[in-house]
Amino acid sequence: MKQLLKRTDSALFSGRLMRRWQQRYQDRCVQIICYHSVARTQCVLTEGTALAHDIDDFERQIDYFSERYRPISLRGLVEAIAAGRSVDRAVVFTFDDGFADNLRRAMPILYRRRIPMTIFPTAGVIGNTDLMWTHKLAWLTRNGHGERLIAAMKSAGFPQREPEEAWPDYARRVYRVDLPAILEDALRDAGQSGPNLAGKLRPYLEAEEMGEADPTFVEFGNHTLTHPVLSALTPSQQEAEIRGAARIVADLTGVPPLAFAYPFGLKRHYTDETQHLVRITGHHAAVDMRRRINAGRLDPFQLSRRPAPHGPRELLDSLIADAPANAYLPVPGRA
């Protein structure tokens, strides 16, 4: 019994030490959280995915993070890194793809708390002139046209979809530059089109509301023209995606995009050439989705984000209590 009590006391003491150590470590971290859609109900484009957050859940998460971290803008983080200033225990809120509810639903919640946000819109669908290819895929597969799409992709020479492989995972794995056109053809065979659905659903930001957004609290970044898997493109195609989107964002807002967000955001989704192109096209930072902790001396072109979680508070606790094994390596050339 004494041995058991000794082991129990030791475990409790070790647990307290570990929590205390994690707390001190987290004091030196910057969390960058990524949301997509924030809405009362999911639409067909986000239904069944982790891309949408209920408004009430979103507001609870914002309060949770704000109580534990210091909310700052992405621009503020980048400027602090450039100046060598401390950005300890900060949190940055970002939004990908450019859903209309980012400004209509999420922004008022953040604005009431005076919390800034960065939106990374897919520039080619601003104004709802078309659907993103990922949303064309979602519409087709959720409306019973999966077999039609399989036949079209097989005819075009795409690799076979694995059993039980989710459609989004499969599409990212086999992505080619002609995939968006194949999806559009499949929509037309089903009696629809990307522009027609975009006009009906209007899921994305309008040009006018981007231009009218308060730049004190809302900044727009670059998320490419069409949201491709950049690693599947040639360097010239990648550059066209990056430069074209940057030009549209600058024209609509009057401000060139400070930062670039890699579509899908894992290492396999972009290349060293992509990183080089982001640097030479006038951006001052880049963010991925590799879920690493931002700690120590940061490189603004190696900032990492985490997707906002779904579920109970315990998931939020685990999100901000990750072990430091995921911390960034020092910036090359620095001690």
Image: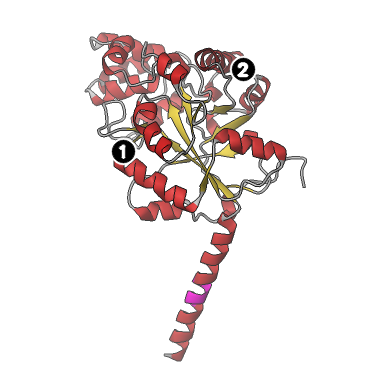
Residue at the image point whose x is 58% and y is 60% from the top: 24
* Numbered disc 2: secondary structure: helix
Residue neighbourhood size for the residue with mark 2, other residues' Cα within 10 Å, grouped as few (<14), some (14–19), many (≥20): some
Q: 44 or 159, which lies in front?
A: 44
Residue 160 percent location from the top left of the image: 38, 25
- Spatial CA span between label 1 and label 2: 39 Å
Residue at the image point whose x is 56% and y is 35% from the top: 74
Residue 90 percent location from the top left of the image: 55, 46
Q: Is residue 12 magenta?
A: yes
Residue 215 shown left or right of residue 145 in the figure? right
* Numbered disc 1: secondary structure: helix
Residue at the image point whose x is 48% and y is 21% from the top: 228
User: Measured along the vertical axis of the image, is residue 332 above or below residue 235?
Assistant: below
Q: Which residue lies under the disc numbered 1?
A: 55
Residue neighbourhood size for the residue with mark 1, other residues' Cα within 10 Å, grouped as few (<14), some (14–19), many (≥20): some
Residue 305 shown left or right of residue 157 in the figure? right
Three-letter amino acid code at the position of disc 1: Ile
The disc at residue 235 is 2
Residue 293 visible somewhere in the drawing? no
Read off the magenta span. Answer: 11-15
In what quadrant of the picture does the N terminus appear? bottom left
Q: 215 or 232, which lies in front?
A: 215
